[in-house]
Image (cartoon, grey):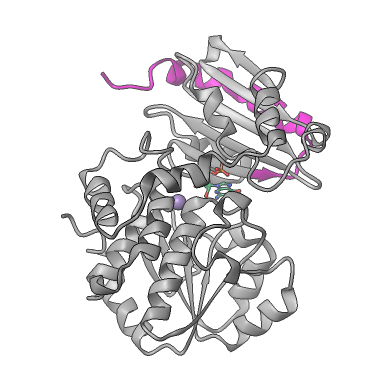
Amino acid sequence: MENYLENTDFNKIREVLDKSGKIILTTHTNPDGDAIGSSLAMFLYLKKRGFSVKVIIPDLYPEFLAWLPSAKEIMIYEKDPGSCKKIVKESDLIICVDFNNLSRLNDLGKVIKKSESVKILIDHHLYPAEDFAYRISFSKISSTSELVYDFICESGYKNLLDKEIASCLYTGIVTDTGSYSYACNYVKTYLITAELFRLGIDGEHIHRLIYDTYSESRLRLLGYAVSDGLTVLHEFHSAYIVLTKENLERFRYQVGDTEGVVNYALSIKDINLAALFMERDDHVKVSFRSKGNFSVDRLAREHFGGGGHSNASGANCSMSLRKTVERFLELLPEFREQLKHVYND
Ligand code: 5GP
Ligand code: MN
């Protein structure tokens, strides 16, 4: 198997880790399966090694991840900033997983930025920031969970992998690849997956826990999003979904309820760019997805102050919902030709 950790700061990180006392793990706002899965896998591994370790994240994780081992131990900064600040202050090492810039952590990011603890990054997004003393950043990979798998094995602790850690890692890979449908054209993704099954995970059951646990209102929100909420612009090979605050309230929106919705817009034949615009209290949450070589990371970064991966990106815009959608529509003519041919062959 190719070693993902070659040409990274891995060896240095191992030394730093061995000398650490109090460790914090953290991940991005609006956390997804890979964010929580890779954090908890690392948490369980470090605990098994006898470290004092805490997971602190900026805001709530979705209910469909609450079954993950030790999820209940995660501390939410938004809920208890005082205790979280104290723990950050007392830490000597902060391991940041599945994001590339502390700005992705909102207020918790500011607290961590100020902290004197050593900061380490383990991530698979493009363009990692300079906020970290050491970085393991590799973008040609399905998920941060795969990097965590390698991290544990290359550290010489493959023997500490168990069914619980494997369930966390599998959740990260399944969710970041849309159940092995994108970002997974790599042999190693499947070799690691095979190892996780050898550790005893129940893949079918995990799939049910993640995807077959919708509330009725979540399914109805999806129904609304792909009917009334959807606009298809065949001329630009694009489709987008708009959800206003009113829509979200009507369907009793809960954290995680719109996870995956944008992919339905991309599932239309010949649609190569999809967007979801969600009106929140003080900003608009934007999700972009694309097929082939059209980079939505560039689109999000250059025009909406966000970022992500080449085929999946996001942004949080301070403009109004109407202005944000208008901005998107103004850009489309510029990309008309690129959006016609997203595959090289
Ligand atoms: P999603 O649309 O699922 O929220 O995010 C898709 C991808 O884009 C994820 O990898 C996520 O980390 C990244 N992303 C989402 N929102 C932002 C953002 O506001 N800024 C940056 N830099 N990346 C984002
Ligand atoms: Mn990820």
Q: Is residue 63 above or below residue 314?
A: below
Point 73% across, 65% down: residue: 78
Q: Nearer the viewer, residue 318 or 185?
A: 185
Residue 227 x %, y %: 67, 17
The quadrant of the image that shows the N terminus is: bottom left
- Based on the displayed image, in which of its 4 quarters is residue 150 positioned? bottom left
Q: Which residues are magenta?
A: 316-345
Decide whether the magenta segment is chiefly helix, strand or loop. helix
The residue most toward the top is: 235
Point 60% across, 14% down: residue: 232
Residue 228 x %, y %: 72, 18
| 266 sits to left or right of 126 | right
Residue 317 located within the stretch drawn in magenta: yes
- Based on the displayed image, in which of its 4 quarters is residue 219 positioned? top right
Q: Is residue 30 above or below residue 320?
A: below
- Can residue 100 be seen from the camera position used here? no
Point 74% across, 79% down: residue: 82
Q: Nearer the viewer, residue 218 or 333?
A: 218
